[in-house]
Image (spheres, rainbow, N blue to C red):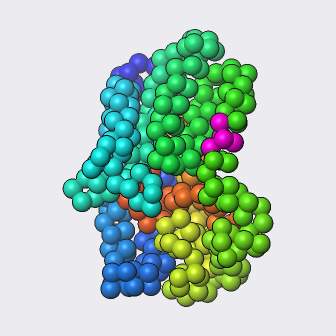
Amino acid sequence: MTDNNQTKDRGGYDGFLLLGMLLLLGIGVVMVYSASSVVSLKRFGSGAYFFKRQVVYALAAILVLIICRHVPYLFYRKMAYPILVVAFLLLVALYLPGVGHPVGGARRWLKVFGLSFQPSEFARLALVIYLAYSMSKKQEKIKVFAVGFLPHVVVLATFGALIVMQPDFGMAAMLVFVVWTMLFVGGVRLSYLLTAVAGMLPIAYYILIHAGYRLRRLTSFLDPWTYQSDAGYQIVHSLMAFGSGGVFGTGIGNSYQKLFYLPEPHTDFIFSVLGEELGLVGVCLVMGLYAMILWRGIVVAMKARDLFATYLAVGLISALGLQVCVNVGVTMGLLPTKGLTLPFVSYGGTSLVMNAAAVGILMNISARQAV
């Protein structure tokens, strides 16, 4: 196919992607208000503080979605290296005095004009774009170690080290999974990937045992009820929320666990509040919407007109799917506690906007896919 054919836009928006995201945004705004009202009232004297901000974030996400939908995906191929450099500089800026904004002992945020921004979220998107460009360009030699594997792993290691130092081991692990998925789909030799994983295990073990809170999280994950007053507190109250919800839930606004039992119920554990208030029916609805988005993303990747678009779609949908799986797995006690938000539902701006950008790019690829 020629670039001319690739850039023909059939117009419109991918209905499955658009409907899934908008419904999740709507559910998210309602659940953020419900989950945060008590906390918001105590901290800021207004029960609608987080709700108002989430509405602004949701509108910003829709704007970003529209913009990315109409920017030809070939633009990202041309800008792969500049985007990667910007992401690297933003991560480095976290460690500059007066620039990085430490919260709870971690340097994960930059403050720009009074707004907080998490560079690691942008770094994830930048890595996906870079890998899609690099692998499509080197496709004929993708199985050569020094061409298809080593350069990509060096970039991943650089970004991963900067993120682990924040510290944010979970996001670094997520980047590894996304990159490995893309390399596997791209045709990199499985022996290289498996050998690298084996080599990283001792490093991961060292990082785990030399951070007491990570070790406590793992221990409490294996037996949360024994540590319910300490490291297992969040998991136990999350499970109690799901148990209280039953099939149809207690009703919106009627969560008991959000009343200062479940820490930060409007962010990482909003799915627990959703399960309590909307029950199994609400949980299945939300998971069905995610399944629809992921299914459509896979279809878009399979029908893409060129390798760059295919790899780009695979990376974007892998990152989104992993974030959903990790958040849901943590809240249900299936994974150790990790601070990842639930896409389009949890309170927060950076993750919401970056995920909206990913869906917008998928829509653009969809509009130019092979018929």
From the viewer's side, name the closer residue of 219 and 308: 219
Residue extending farthest left: 113
Q: Say whether residue 121 is left or right of residue 117.
A: right
Location of residue 17 with respect to 252 vertically, above or below: above
Q: Position of residue 90 (x, y in %)?
A: 34, 40
Dominant secondary structure of the residues highlighted in magenta in the image: helix
Residue at position x 36%, y 43% in the image:
95
The magenta region covers 203-207
Quadrant for residue 319, please give it. Answer: top right
Residue closest to the eye, 173 or 364: 173
Please, is residue 66 above or below residue 272 in the view?
above
Number of residue marks: 0
- The residue located at (57%, 19%) in the rendering is 150
Q: Going by the image, does 46 lie left or right of 369?
A: left
Query: In this orientation, which residue lies closer to the viewer: 316 or 126?
Result: 126
Residue 237 picture quarter: bottom right
342 part of magenta stretch: no
Q: In this rendering, is residue 96 above or below 212?
A: above
Q: Is residue 44 left or right of residue 120?
A: left
- Place of residue 159 in the rendered image (x, y in percent of width and height, measured from the top left): 47, 35
Instruction: Tell me the residue at 55%/14% (across/down).
Output: 147
Q: Residue at x 51, y 15 (%)?
A: 138
Q: Is 322 situated above or below 345?
A: above
